[in-house]
Amino acid sequence: SDAPSYSPTVDPTFEPTHLPTYEPSAGPSPRPTPQPSSKPTAAPSYAPSVDPTFEPTLAPTYEPTLKPSDRPTVAPSYGPSAPPSIGPSAEPTYAPTFSETHEPTLKPSMEPSAAPSWQPFIIDSVNCDPNKAAPLQVLRWEDADEYSLRSWDFQTGEYKKEYNIDYFDGHINAVAMWERADGNNYAIGSFGGNLSWFSKKKRIDIGSLVYDTPNAGTVIGNDYYYARSPGKDERNCGIYFVEDIAGEPRFETTSNLCISKSVFEGAVLDFVAANEDDADRYGTSSTYVDDNEAEGLYLFGLGEQHEVLIVKLVDKMPQAYAVVSSVIDWRSKEDDDEPSDDSGYGAGYSFLGPTEQRFFFTSNKGFGMFELQMPITVPDDCWNTGTNTDDHKECKDAPAATLTWMGASAVTNYNDGLNCPVTTVFGHISYAPTYVPSPMPSKSDRRLTDSSASDRRIRRSLRRGNWRGLWRGF
């Protein structure tokens, strides 16, 4: 019949009745009834109902509903929803979400963060966006009266002005970049013989250096190393350092090493620093100097006939140095105009790849930007030590190092280089190998067909200083 029975049946019917029973059944029917029962069932259904109930359930359903209910449940859900909100909530939540929100909350959280935030440094940081972080120079552009900070343009070799250093009218040189552990970078250098942090707006002195006019400087970790034209004369032949530049600086005034004026031509005008320690914060583990020692610290510089100066640091002190000759690889230069004169290399740069550092120098005479290829081999008997330079010598038994021409550079003077740790502005310099080989071989070059005999002549030409004869040999 169409009327319901006065008591529930022992077993549910296979099809729902048109009307509910007067008393709820002990369990839910296999299929939902057209209308809700007048009283709630003893236990919730295992799946959400097609339409929401008129009153909230005492606990959430086991699976989420397709749409939110019109009224909140009496009990909260067991955890936060999976995705965070697009913007901050008006009131802080009692527990954080598992992933960060796109913007900060309007009010602070009730619990402190896991780690403290970094305090602002005493000077403004340098913008080190890898897409914009070109090699930098502090220099007197075209012999101007004041110094400026300029960035190298890979396409033209010119230097684009970033800002004038108009708040200081003395000698500025031996500049370098220090990276704090939070990833921010800060410029430091000598301002009239005072080691100073500097930015576009101001400088902050932290102490006096041994030299009034140092012109070679670099940073390793938290320590600053500097010198004044090492190799030019033996009155200013020492290399000094300042320890803990961002904390409580300690100025070392003793040098146990003197660079002889007879081991290379001219003077070294800038340093770059190499760290073989694979436990440093970058995780680099390459060998830069093949000297039968692991995890060394070194300084590199170039003489005026591109001889390579390698300085070994032990317990932070400059302990020994070696000088090896080098050859220049001009393959990437489009024309055959290869300079035959000597040049100072007044700006050095060190950039980080995924597993190694890379080292570059620019010629003050505008010959170009050069990469110093690694590793450099230094036999044990090539190291010079001490301050008595009578027995110091160039290493003639070591293989010649290689400098690769990377791009054009403008003529510079009264200059020094610094850089952010990572850059992509070189373009054609890849920081990782390609996944597959190129479909065609690289373009051949007549300057790559050197026999072993011509290679020996190249090295002899370098040691005699016969650059002009060298370039005709390619």
Image (spheres, rainbow, N blue to C red):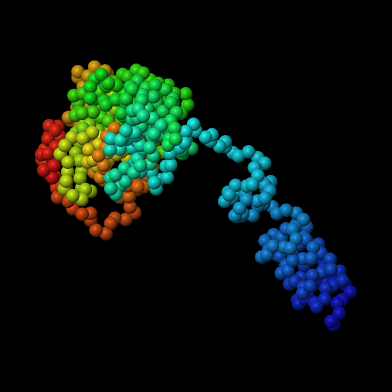
Q: Where does residue 203 sit, x and y in percent of width and height?
A: 43, 30
Residue 112 versus residue 314 in the image, above or below: below
What quarter of the picture does the C terminus occupy?
A: top left
Residue 287 versus residue 57 in the image, above or below: above
What quarter of the picture does the N terminus occupy?
A: bottom right
Residue at left 14%, top 37%?
A: 467
Residue placed farthest to the bottom in the image? 1
Residue at left 29%, top 27%?
A: 311
Can residue 103 be seen here? The reply is yes
Residue 49 versus residue 214 in the image, above or below: below
Q: In which quarter of the image is residue 270?
A: top left
Q: Where does residue 391 sit, x and y in percent of width and height?
A: 19, 19
Q: In this view, does 107 lie to the left or right of 278?
A: right
Q: In this view, does 393 lie to the left or right of 360?
A: left
Q: Where does residue 362 sit, x and y in percent of width and height?
A: 27, 39
Residue 73 versus residue 458 in the image, above or below: below
Residue placed farthest to the right in the image? 6
Residue at left 75%, top 54%?
A: 75
Q: Where does residue 358 sit, x and y in percent of width and height?
A: 32, 40
Can residue 178 be seen here? The reply is no
Q: Nearer the viewer, residue 200 or 233?
A: 200
Q: Report how many numbered discs are placed on residues in the image.
A: 0
Q: Which of 206 and 219 is in front in this view?
A: 206
Q: In which quarter of the image is residue 172?
A: top left
Q: Nearer the viewer, residue 146 or 327?
A: 146
Residue placed farthest to the front in the image? 145
Residue at left 73%, top 53%?
A: 76
Q: Which of 472 and 13 is in front in this view?
A: 472
Q: In which quarter of the image is residue 295?
A: top left
